[in-house]
Image: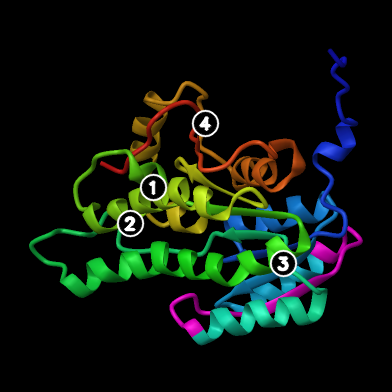
Amino acid sequence: MQAFQPKAFSALFDLTGKTAIVTGGANGIGKATALRLAQAGANIVIADLKIEDAKSAAKEVESFGVKALAVECNILKDDDLVAMVDKTVATFGTVNILISNAGGGGGGQEDPSKISVDDFRRDFELNVFSAWRLCQLCVPHMKKSGYGSIVITTSMSSINKSPDMSGYAASKAAVNHMVANLAHDFGPEVRINAVGPGATRTAALQSVLTPEIEARMLSHTPIKRLGEADDIAGAMLYFASPISEWVSGQTLFVNGGGVQTLD
């Protein structure tokens, strides 16, 4: 039996020459992920509604000696998704990594007696339909290139149970199961996984966080702090990199070992 020969450690996270799309990459978790992937050698496309923020983030990415492209993109518009992928391929020749991070919804404000079917549908358009469509657009390029990794941002709400979350939570639960099934469609050349952040210090959380809510969250969190964007970016890097080459169809929750909810 041949003795095990471990790969060089540096090769396990080496993304040199790879091209990564990061949606919602101008701020927060998306930006932290873009910077981590750039640090590993990937060229980065930052797709975001806020084009000036995207351009600023692209400059930071380039400080790692890689190339970056900022693209204005509304994930609810199919023409924007197609144009963004086309521009990526025209600029860099291919797509190897997709971080489908942009999303949203009305989580925490979805009183079922007050929201409409359109509100519920929008959660799915933001979090499920857009990610599925981006996969459809990117996978052919990934297969042709010989390297493909897709990571979709899901949420702890996909497994938590809380009031006023039915649409958002259901859409994120759909992401988890969609990922598990698409792994069978995309393999062996392309892997697909999901990262589910716990309570992470982003602008969205800060807008609703109070000292009382934070204290309740930490009372159920073994690692006694809230998450930072770079904590989530580390999980994104793991899935994007060769080190996870035998991992697909999985959802990894990054939550300090606990459960954090707003109620």
Which of disc 1 and disc 3 is earlier in sequence?
3
Viewer-closest of 150 and 145: 145
Q: Which three-letter amino acid code belongs to the residue tagged 1? A: His
- CA gap, disc 3 and disc 4: 36 Å
**Which marked residue is nearer to the observer: mark 1 or mark 2?**
1
Residue under label 1, please give it. Answer: 177
Callout 3 crowding tier (Cα within 10 Å): few <14, some 14–19, many ≥20 = many
Which of disc 4 and disc 2 is earlier in sequence?
2
Image coordinates of residue 215 in percent, x first then y, are 38, 31
Q: Which three-letter amino acid code belongs to the residue tagged 2? A: Ser
Question: What label sits on residue 95 in the rendered view?
Answer: 3
User: Quick one: SS at disc 4?
Assistant: loop
Which of disc 4 and disc 1 is earlier in sequence?
1
Which of disc 2 and disc 3 is earlier in sequence?
3
Q: Residue at x 54, y 39 (%)?
A: 227
- CA gap, disc 3 and disc 1: 24 Å
Magenta-colored span? 61-78
- CA gap, disc 2 and disc 4: 27 Å
Residue 248 among magenta residues: no
Q: Is residue 231 left or right of residue 195?
A: right
Q: Is residue 192 above or below residue 126?
A: above
Q: Quadrant of residue 96?
A: bottom right
Which of disc 2 and disc 1 is earlier in sequence?
2
Residue under label 2, please give it. Answer: 171
Quadrant of the snapshot with the N terminus: top right
